Image (spheres, grey):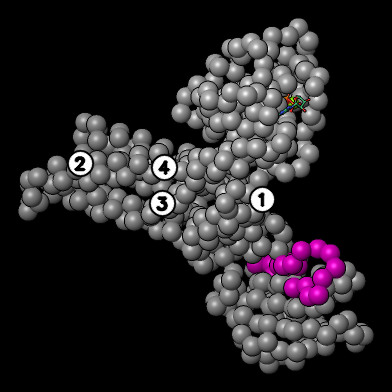
Amino acid sequence: MKNTIFAPATAAGKAGVAIVRVSGPDATAVFERFGVRKDIEPRKAVFAKLKKADGTPIDDAVVLYFKAPNSFTGEDVVELQTHGGRAVLSSVLAELSLIDGFRPADRGEFTRRAVENGKMDLTAAEGLADLVDAETEQQRKQALRQMNGDLGRLYDGWREELVRLLAWSEAYIDFPEEEIPADVSERIRGKITELKAAVENHLQNGKRGERLRDGFQIAIVGAPNAGKSSLMNRLADRDVAIVSSTAGTTRDVIEVRMDINGYPVVIADTAGLRQTDEVIEAEGVRRAKKRAKEADLILAVYDASAPVEDSETKAFQGGNVLKIMNKKDKVSDCSGEGLWISAKTGEGTDALLDRIAGFVENALSMREEPSLTRVRHRQSLEEYRDYLERSLSAPEIELAAEDLRLAMRALGKITGAVRVEELLDIIFKDFCIGK
Ligand SMILES: Nc1nc2c(ncn2[C@@H]2O[C@H](COP(=O)(O)OP(=O)(O)O)[C@@H](O)[C@H]2O)c(=O)[nH]1
Ligand SMILES: [Mg+2]
């Protein structure tokens, strides 16, 4: 018999109302324990005076009952909405832990039960976790979409197609001479080729979903004293990095998270690029270069007033590099190539922000088809694609069919149709308690 689990569903701390959620076969034992009348109708808010077993009052509360299977977890669920004081909450939790078969919920356990009871697939559960974590508007939209099953439906569609292809293959294997059209093997191959093209396309635009979850990465690079830290502070609108005329001040990578038009952006200020014998600074330069290599967008900052050419920064070229001429206020001729700004006065930084927003939007904006959002999706999808590919070059139809079965398994791992317990443990560890 399964335990009945309980946990606060609201964040810890003082608040107007706190919600404690109980789910499991014995959830309705709560009524008796707290001296609430037992004939509570499902889905109806009921006012109740919660009492301890010895009859002393705990708090006035609103009680909600969701009868299985019509609840979030698919089990009997009881919600106690009490006042949000710490003492009230700990008193309710202490009382719950005394009920037979009751125990505190693990991280994500409510959602895990919902998945196990077929209330949602794994991608939807992940979408729900992302929705709780969403910090920007676009992250929220993507998470909501995934929670509502868009991604799961896409993969289910592919799975159904595979089931059909497998059935055809098997008929072909079992009755090679009977009334199966001669071109069936060609038709199967054609369909597999289509599926493969679809997943390849999906994998390509997939980085967008992962980036929207983790943030678009921008690295500010340039020579010492070019004004990188000043620019970082300008963009973040606060003093995050130390600005100084002493070259080599910034040594480690300093990050700020920003919301640009609803998109999450991580801006990194880095150590100035120059040859140096100083060990710590050299490490800083190494980290700066590494960060730039991983970035989605590089802001290459030049000191427009400097008399010498900056060849280290010039090494950064390409479609994801924005050339920025800083210290505009110090020079009279601003006609050269690049975006001219003054990190000191703020001139030109609005235009720069617009340019950045353009890059971010182009990289992260939502497409018609939902995007994969996690490395684990990518890994399974690559596996799936490889099996499709292998089945196309299989020497016999029996082997091709086996590859299709393996491809189906790889897809099933993403949605949870194929259950891998360790995988579930990893996924739900990222959840909060009470979700
Ligand atoms: N006149 C002027 N000085 C600037 C500008 N941006 C930065 N500085 C100055 O240049 C020096 C180095 O700035 P900092 O941001 O620390 O450069 P970093 O080494 O590239 O991070 C400081 O003295 C800043 O005040 C600017 O746009 N105009
Ligand atoms: Mg600096």
Q: Amino acid at mark 4?
A: Asn
Residue labelled with disc 2: 189
Does the residue at mark 3 contact the one at mark 4 (Cβ under 8 Å)?
yes
Q: Residues within 10 Å of mark 1 (few under 14, many from 20)?
A: few
Q: Residue under circle 4?
A: 205
**Residue span colored magenta:** 2-19
The mark nearer the N terminus, 3 or 2, is 2
Is disc 1's CB within 8 Å of ligand 2? no
Q: Residues within 10 Å of mark 3 (few under 14, many from 20)?
A: few
- Residue 26 sits above or below residue 234 on the image: below
- Ligand 2 quarter of the rendering: top right
Q: Nearer the viewer, residue 143 or 389?
A: 143
Task: Tell me, yes or no, whether the highlighted magenta stretch contains residue 3.
Answer: yes
Q: Is mark 2 within 8 Å of ligand 1?
A: no
Q: Residue at x 65, y 72 (%)?
A: 24
Q: Residue at x 54, y 54 (%)?
A: 138
Label 4 close to label 2 by CB (< 8 Å): no
Residue carrying label 1: 429
In this rendering, which labeled residue sits more in front, label 3 or label 4? 3
Q: Which of pointers 4 and 2 lies earlier in the amino acid sequence?
A: 2
Q: Which residue in the protein does label 3 denote?
A: 367
On the rendered structure, is 314 left or right of 273? left
For the image shown, how many numbered marks are present on the structure?
4
Report the Cα–Cα distance between label 3 and label 4. 9 Å
